[in-house]
Amino acid sequence: MIILSKKQLVTRISHILIVLIGISFITFLLTYISPGDPVRNMFTATGVMPTEELVEQTRQEMGLNDPFLMQYVRWLTHCLHGDFGKSYSLNKPVLELLAGRVLPTLKLASMSMVIMLVLAVPFGVLSALYKDSWIDLLIRGVTFLGCAMPNFWVGLLLMLFLCVQFPIFPVISSSGDFKSLFLPALTLAIAMAAKYTRQVRTAVLEELSQDYVIGAQARGVKKSKIIWRNVFPNALLPLITMFGMSVGSLLGGTSVVEVIFSYPGLGNLAVSAITSCDYNLIQGYVLWMSLIYMVINLIVDASYISIDPRMRLKE
């Protein structure tokens, strides 16, 4: 297996660090200038009505009266040591809260990707093999609807029919078992499957028009062997980048679906942090998601170089 060289790895890691510093500065700046007082939010979350003297004393103890750059450097230094601060609303360390929600989100994202691949790959190949037939038109029409429907609407429809009208699945998906995971995962997978089906169709059609396919057919090679041994592996190459971006989006962009199904993931935690103006938790969440997203992209780059010999020559 071909992996990134030491020089390439150092270059990409340095790029990740630069981007993370930029993201951390912008995130801290936005929370700094946003309306609301984190000290008052902290007391409100505990049910205490503080006096002005107590608020000012707490602000002084927390260093919130210091200049902006001093606050940012202090916060960034703590983050580099693994200390993202304490949640104002939940009164727990931010890192502990984030770490506790990673596994449920990973389970949801993994099941969504599996459902998406089960739907997208066969239907995409089928649509390409029967181009312009009624099968192709039907699949393209369904995928067009899948791309047009927003996740929250799909989730509400699935909940209405499969939880209320026909109580097959639970309304609240908090237990973490298969039945609890299936509906939110299916909600996320429908839109992705629609996009990937169209992409697989386009990639397979492009490969079918290549000279090596015509040559293999002229030599009498079976069509099924050409499709699965030659066309399909080559068609997967442009999908690798999309796949990596989809994984990153699922880890950070499942908020609406998690809220609808009351699923205890990172997205639900982020929505709670935003509604309660929990700045420490918001900042930690943004940094956490940014790091995961960029690490996934690094893995995708390495896998792309490993699969495509032309990329190895360029590197």
Image: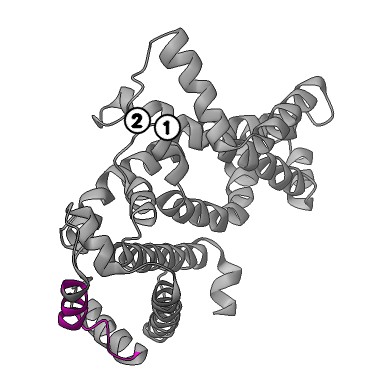
**How many other residues sit within 10 Å of disc 2, few (<14), some (14-19) or many (≥20)?**
many
Name of the residue lying farthest toward the top: 166
- Tag 2 secondary structure: helix
Can the viewer see residue 188 in this picture?
yes
Residue that appears at 42% across and 54% down:
252
As drawn, the label of residue 143 is: none
Range shown magenta: 54-67
Query: Along the line of sight, which residue is nearer the eye, 276 or 24?
Result: 276
Q: Quadrant of the C terminus?
A: bottom right
Residue that appears at 45% across and 48% down:
250
Work out whether 178 lies above or below 165. below
Query: Is 59 covered by the magenta stretch?
Result: yes
Query: Is 160 covered by the magenta stretch?
Result: no
Residue holding disc 1: 184
Q: Assess whether mark 1 and mark 2 are in contact (beta carbons under 8 angstroms).
A: yes
**How many other residues sit within 10 Å of disc 1, few (<14), some (14-19) or many (≥20)?**
many
Q: Quadrant of residue 31?
A: bottom left
Q: Position of residue 163 (x, y in %)?
A: 41, 16
Q: Quadrant of residue 86?
A: bottom left
Residue holding disc 2: 181
Q: Position of residue 169 (x, y in %)?
A: 36, 17
- Tag 1 secondary structure: helix
Work out whether 295 lies above or below 196. below
> With 97 as the anchor, is 141 left or right in this view?
right
